[in-house]
Image (cartoon, grey):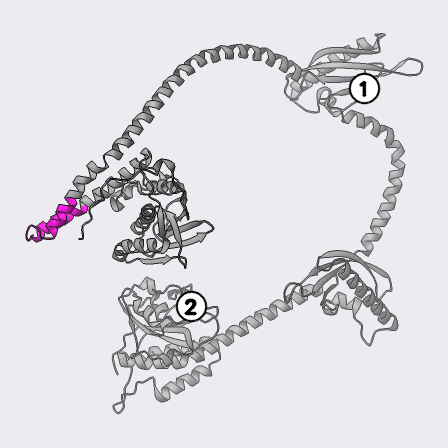
Amino acid sequence: MTSSGLETSAVDSQPQLAGERLAELLSVISEAPDFSTAATFLVAQFADVMSARRAAIFAIDTVGKGLRAVGSVGLDREELPAEPVSLEEHFHPLIVSVLSLNAVTGDGCERERLGLPFAEWVSIPFPQPQFRGAPALLDEQTIDAISVSGCVIRRAGPVDRRRRLGHAPGGVLVVEASVSEDELSALTHAAALAGPVLSRMFAVEEYRRSTDQLDQQRNLLTAIVNSLPDPIVIINAKNDIVVQNRRAEHLLSGTDADSEGRRRAVEINNLLFTSHLSKKAISVASEAGSRELNLVDPDEGNDLLFEVLTHNLNREGPGDGTTVSILRDVTDLRRAAGELERQVQRVRLAEIDAKRERDRLNLILENVADPILVTDDRADIILMNRQAEQLFEAAGKGGASGNLAVRSNDTKFTTFISDFTISPSLSRREQMSLLVPESGGELPVEVVSGKILNRRGEALAIVSVLHDLTEQVENERLYEELKKFSAELEQRISEATSDLADQNARLQWQSKELEKANRLKSEFLASMSHELRTPINALIGYTALMLDRIYGELTQRQEDGLTRIQAAAQHLLALINDILDLAKIEAGRMPLHLEDAKLGDMISEITQQMEPLIRKKTLKFVCEVPPGDVRMHTDKTKVKQILLNLLSNAVKFTHGGEVRVTCEVIHETVEFDVSDTGIGIREEHLEAIWEDFRQVDQSRTREFGGTGLGLSITRKLVQALGGEISMSSVYGKGSTFTVTLPLRTAPRPEESVIASTEPLPLISER
């Protein structure tokens, strides 16, 4: 017995799980009553062979999304993973084992990551037959690239491509034990033979479970449909009944045992229903709707009225013509509705005469916004609208103060009406102050009253209209205040105008001084181009000569120091060039040297300049140039400077991934896209990147360097060439800069005679 529990014969060193025992194992598994029994038996046999106390078996679910535990030995349910392990976790030891069909051993591998309480273990995968939608096996390069902390991927001998052909990942056995290479090879072979058997049993059980679930759902749906009191019919495009419930069968289907009368009623119902379907197809060919249908009760012979609701089913796809019709019995409802309508009509006719005069009066009262009151010859109120009720009826509003307000209003109004009643005049107008019962505030109103006389000239009633004067009074008050404020405002405006004139004069003077200072600054920096760069170029040149051993050999320490001096000088020269370029642009001293240039040659030169930097950062560089001889009439140097600035930024801020340059000719323009998979820019910082001396994240200045002038200069150069520049970015995923330049740049008249006399910077060969 070896350390893992595998017995070997003294004659042929045959592993214990081989030969007749392996055949017996496969036979027992294939004859197991269910998948769970077979899986548990298999893992128990492996544990027995390896003298292990604990083991578990995992299988890929039918959907192929995860690896879940299906059996175990020596483990409680709580010790197994509760959730399936996702097949996307390529660094999980079990996922590596099952997707590569290679064993994985662990000694000290993190228990939480494994999901099992094993300290020393081995995982042995088993395959399943290949099928559509099965998880893909990992290729050998991917397997070699995967590293799982504390675990070792073990191949049982050399890679056998026939062992992988026609197989897909099926599952994995995890045993708490250690094995030798020979033992592992025997166990892997046994698992490879048992895997397809287990997979077929698992698939059959899943199919049976799904079929049983569908049968239960279908039976439940059939019971629900048959229990409905409304007939339900499903018709195909040929108007043939495909499915119907019991109520529909009662109306539309007959048997040989039916009486002659019932058979005739069923035939009539079928003719009526078929005619309804034909009319429905003509009127609304594809829209759902409802229509009425008259049928005959086969048992009673009575007429039945149904409301037919028809909807498209689209079982085989849009427009297959299958519809479902629901027949709702509305016979009793329509009879009751008809009788109710007749009764309502009789009542309505009886009430018309009685309501005519009252409605006419109410219409007048309720459509007037002002309170209206009608009083008799004794000054008693006999009629008023809702607006008047709010003033002359308490109705529990405002409590005790509300009641006092109502009594006060009633007293004032009654006094007015009494005086008007005994007056010989037919109309009267007067202002009075009433109280609002709800708030207790004053309400100024104008009362307009008129007498209604009979044929003898006697007053029958007095109609009074109360017009709210609140707005008028408020307007008068506001008008007086407005006149007062207007006078004050005119005085303040007069005083402020004098101050503004003085301030405006000072601001104009300061603005001119600032423009003058800015212009002098730009002219000074532009004129200092030669004076600033000549010493730096000399420093770079002499450093390069010393590094080339022109003045003799150097020690390693001297060479390191000179190298640092050279790098710092070149960096300082780049910063000075950025500042001077910006100054020349602002001062209008950046000339355009227009010439014919091949687009492909420019891109090739830019690619050669950027290649060392891209290779240093191990980035993928993709360049797409349109075919053909595309020529541009432009300033070749400035186009290269624009693209080099954008590519330098892309490489600087990209730690891994790719940098891509694409060119496309659109009408009379060339569109350059420079994209990367770098750190990206937040949306709120997209506008700030174009500002002078501005970097989005000042904390990164030490990490990436720069003055913050690169994009500002780039945009000004693009504008000088008559083009446009824009950008889009997703933070954490990368950025894309788009430059659109004309194929032919028009020269500027003021620059046609300008030529640059500034020396080019020295570039060391080191």
Q: Position of residue 374 (x, y in %)?
A: 81, 19
Which residue is painted at 87% across and 64% down in the image? Answer: 301
- Farthest residue to the bottom: give it: 11
Gap between marks 2 and 1 measured at Cα: 88 Å
- Taking the image as drawn, is residue 73 in sight? no
Q: Is residue 753 shown above or below 735?
A: above
Instruction: State the quadrant of the N terminus.
Output: bottom left
Q: Is residue 445 shown above or below 642?
A: above
Residue 687: say if magenta.
Answer: no
Which residue is painted at 87% across and 31% down in the image? Answer: 356
Which residue is painted at 45% across and 66% down in the image? Answer: 65
Q: How many marks are shown on the rendered structure?
A: 2
Amino acid beneath label 1? Val
Q: Position of residue 289 (x, y in %)?
A: 73, 56
Q: Nearer the viewer, residue 434 or 67?
A: 67
- As helix, strand or loop, the secondary structure at mark 1 comes to strand
Dominant SS type (magenta)? helix
**Which stretch is magenta?**
539-567
Q: Quadrant of residue 621?
A: bottom left
- As helix, strand or loop, the secondary structure at mark 2 comes to strand
Q: Which mark is residue 569?
A: none
Q: Nearer the viewer, residue 664 or 430?
A: 664
Q: Quadrant of residue 591?
A: top left
Residue 552: say if magenta.
Answer: yes
Which residue is painted at 15% across and 43% down in the image? Answer: 538
Q: Position of residue 111 (x, y in %)?
A: 31, 64
Left or right, 277 with respect to 657, comes to: right
User: What residue is disc 1 on?
Assistant: 374
- Farthest residue to the front: give it: 753
